[in-house]
Image: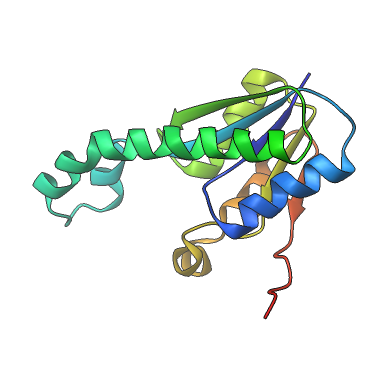
Amino acid sequence: MSILIAYDGSADSRAAIEFAAKHLAAEPVVVVTVWEPLLVQLRRYPLADVAAIKDGADEWRELAEEHAKEGADLARASGIAEVTHRAVADRESIWKTIVDVADELDASLIVTGSRGLSEARSVLLGSVSNHVLHHARRPTLIVPPQPRTP
């Protein structure tokens, strides 16, 4: 078994990793970053400039891999000994991809921040963490935003 931590580079996802390191028993951790391939972006944003999306497809994958590695490095720095990372292509929705990867790993727990990098969109569509909480068939820990320091 392992703990899956969803990570997108946001302050809330960093707080989720730090919280997990501080409060959870030592289990292997998989840091997962989900990215959207070209076809998913076109389906989701049909009026978008196809050339601009296509030109950025490889960059999105590379950025997701960098974010996943960054999250794994943060987990190690926070005290988690056994950490791996994965960048996973979103085929339907980010929350569903997180739930599917947790099922594939038979994760004992899913950890996520309450808000990610797309705060404004989550107000309209419902946040990823909210959907993970309501659709995962395993325990889910949502770490709230950390107080801002002046």
Residue 21 in the image: x percent, y percent?
80, 40
Judging from the image, the colouring scheme is rainbow
- In the current view of this chain or complex, which residue is farthest to the bottom? 150
Residue farthest left in this picture: 51
Coordinates of residue 88 in the picture (x, y in percent): 46, 29
Residue 21 drawn above or below residue 85: below
Residue at the image position 75 percent from the left and 41 percent from the top: 78
Rendered image quadrant of residue 91: top left
Is residue 133 something that shows in the picture? no
- Identify the residue at horizontal 75%, vertical 47% (top origin): 18
Viewer-side residue, 135 vs 8: 8
In the visual, does 34 lie left or right of 85? left
Q: Residue at x 70, y 75 (%)?
A: 149
Q: Is residue 86 left or right of residue 18?
A: left
- Locate the C terminus by quadrant: bottom right
Q: Locate residue 31 relative to residue 33 in the image: left or right.
A: right
- Residue 110: x percent and y percent? 72, 37
Up-down: is 125 above or below 142? below
Whether 93 is drawn above or below 103: the answer is below
The N terminus lies in quadrant: top right
**Which residue is pictured at 80% across the width and 27% down the height?**
108
